[in-house]
Image: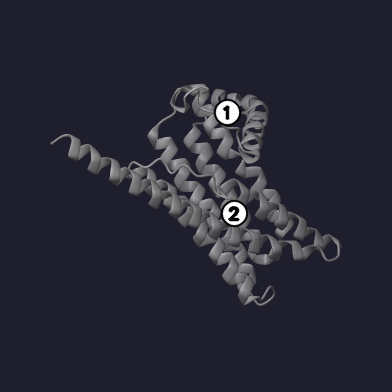
């Protein structure tokens, strides 16, 4: 007859390739950045200060360089500061100060930094020199959809749902695709021909991927909400 299904041990789920990549990338950068984080602690710098400085640097790189079409130097500046997102967390762990306030500040300023990046690109495409209304609209859509994708998960969790879904294009993917494309497109100013087409392609990829991710999260929240409501009704019926 074989082992009853109910008594069989649960099958192990293998982590996705993206989850494994994120895990090893985070472990690598943790090893690299830990000494730097320790140095900042010895200098008396707080994790919150690193978060604020990092966000300010990203905003400066995006809103000063990108609207002028200086994609290479803007991306270099942003990349230097975007690692603050890992440094402040590393510092908090070393200090044993992980807090709800720190998580809130970090999450909130991440949204500000993302908005600055896509806002800077939208300003470039809205300008006389980079005039392209369609790409300006795509950049604005990337900005808005990124905010809504983050909101759907946060809102779902705030009403007690796990929101168990790995979206197609989450924040890390949006940043990597956009910044790599921006940096490479900026090489056009140094005489590399044709490479500027990478940025429009990347924006369309991020826009479509963000829309798919949003749909994935909305569907997941709807399913989990229905399951939670059904469980509540069953529990209420049993308690009478």
Residue on which disc 1 sits: 40
Residue on which disc 2 sits: 60
Is residue 63 visible to us here?
A: no
Q: Where is residue 231 in the image (x, y as percent from the top left)?
A: 29, 40
- How are the colours assigned in the image? one colour
Give the image quarter of residue 42: top right
Q: Residue furthest front?
A: 1
Q: What element carries label 2?
A: helix
Is residue 211 visible to us here?
A: yes
Q: In this view, does 30 lie to the left or right of 235?
A: right
The one nearer the camera, 226 or 131, is: 226
Number of numbered discs on residues: 2
- From the viewer's perspective, is residue 175 above or below residue 131? above
Q: Position of residue 125 (x, y in %)?
A: 64, 71
Q: Where is residue 9 in the image (x, y as percent from the top left)?
A: 50, 23
Residue occupying image coordinates x 44% and y 54% = 218
Give the image quarter of residue 137: bottom right
Alpha-carbon neighbours of circle 2 within 10 Å: few (<14), some, or many (≥20)? Answer: many
Give the image quarter of residue 7: top left
The disc placed on residue 217 is: none
Q: If you read the primary sequence from the N terminus, does the residue marked by circle 2 or circle 1 appear first?
A: 1
Residue occupying image coordinates x 77% and y 56% = 184
Alpha-carbon neighbours of circle 1 within 10 Å: few (<14), some, or many (≥20)? Answer: some
- From the viewer's perspective, is residue 55 above or below residue 40? below
The one nearer the camera, 8 or 27, is: 8
Residue occupying image coordinates x 53% and y 34% = 88
Q: Position of residue 235 (x, y in %)?
A: 23, 37
Q: What element carries label 1?
A: helix
- From the viewer's perspective, is residue 121 above or below residue 223? below
The one nearer the camera, 188 or 38, is: 188
């Amino acid at each position: 007859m074989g082992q009853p299904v109910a008594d069989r041990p649960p099958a192990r789920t293998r982590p996705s390739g993206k989850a494994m990549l994120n895990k090893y990338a985070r472990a690598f950068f943790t090893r690299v950045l830990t000494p730097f984080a320790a140095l900042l602690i010895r200098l008396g710098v707080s994790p919150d200060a690193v978060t604020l400085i990092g966000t300010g640097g990203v905003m400066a790189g995006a809103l000063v360089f990108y609207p002028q079409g200086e994609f290479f130097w803007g991306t270099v500046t942003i990349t230097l500061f975007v690692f603050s997102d890992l440094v402040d967390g590393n510092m908090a762990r070393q200090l044993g100060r992980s807090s709800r306030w720190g998580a809130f500040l970090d999450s909130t300023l991440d949204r500000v930094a993302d908005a600055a990046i896509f806002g800077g690109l939208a300003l470039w495409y809205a300008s006389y020199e980079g005039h392209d209304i369609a790409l300006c609209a795509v950049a604005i859509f990337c900005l808005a959809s990124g905010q809504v994708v983050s909101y759907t998960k946060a809102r779902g969790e705030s009403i007690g749902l796990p929101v168990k879904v790995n979206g197609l294009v989450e924040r890390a993917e949006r940043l990597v695709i956009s910044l790599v494309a921006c940096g490479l497109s900026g090489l056009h100013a140094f005489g590399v021909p044709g490479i500027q087409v990478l940025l429009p392609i990347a924006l369309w990829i991020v826009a479509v991927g963000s829309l798919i991710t949003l749909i994935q999260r909305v569907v997941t929240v709807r399913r989990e909400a229905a399951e939670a409501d059904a469980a509540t009704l069953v529990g209420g019926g049993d308690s009478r």
